[in-house]
Amino acid sequence: MRAAVGFCLLLTFAGEAVAASPAQKCTSAKMKAAANIGAADAKCVSRASSGGVPIDEACLDKSSLKLLQAFERAEASGGCLTVDDAPQVAGILEGVVTFAEENLGDDGSNGSRRCASTRRNAAGAYLSAVLRCHAVRALAGALPMPHVSIGRS
């Protein structure tokens, strides 16, 4: 993951430094917020997995509220290209969490639960790193990011 973030920074700062526009600042702030919430949601799922208990909905609700608040702060600064899009972003993050929960499962044994917990947490960390990379590039006016495939061919 460190290599991915380092590569992102290399791509971002290879060009000239220019003052960020309000739209770039807003986009970057929203992506940073989504990165934080994506990692927090993954931790909620990871904790449940390691304990063999259902996901704590209060944990997910808390992170969703933080996302809404962060988007409101970013939009209050002005210059955003989009507004009132926190619910859509929250839905996307929820879809990623659901995907991790369904596809990084366990067989119910303690070892399997620990492994699934670690993988789910790693998926959240990766999501967070990618979104932070986008946030840095947005601030530098370097979006969209080059497409990087992480799936199998």
Image: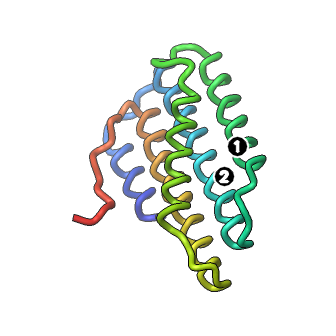
Give the residue drawn at x 73%, y 41%: 61
Identify residue type, mark 1: Ser
Q: Are marks 1 and 2 in contact (CB under 8 Å)?
A: yes
Secondary structure of the residue carrying tag 2 is helix
Q: Is residue 100 above or below residue 139?
A: below
**In the rendering, at what x and y percent does residue 99 appear?**
48, 56
Q: Is residue 129 left or right of residue 63?
A: left
Identify residue type, mark 2: Ala
Residue 63 badge: 1
Distance in Å between CA atoms under marks 1 and 2: 7 Å
Quadrant of the rendered image containing residue 149: bottom left
In this view, the residue farthest toward the right is 58
Q: Is residue 102 left or right of residue 141?
A: right
Residue 40 badge: 2
Q: Is residue 128 left or right of residue 117?
A: left
Q: Residues within 10 Å of mark 2 (few under 14, many from 20)?
A: many
**In the rendering, at what x and y percent does residue 117 appear?**
62, 71
Secondary structure of the residue carrying tag 1 is helix
Q: Nearer the viewer, residue 8 or 85?
A: 85
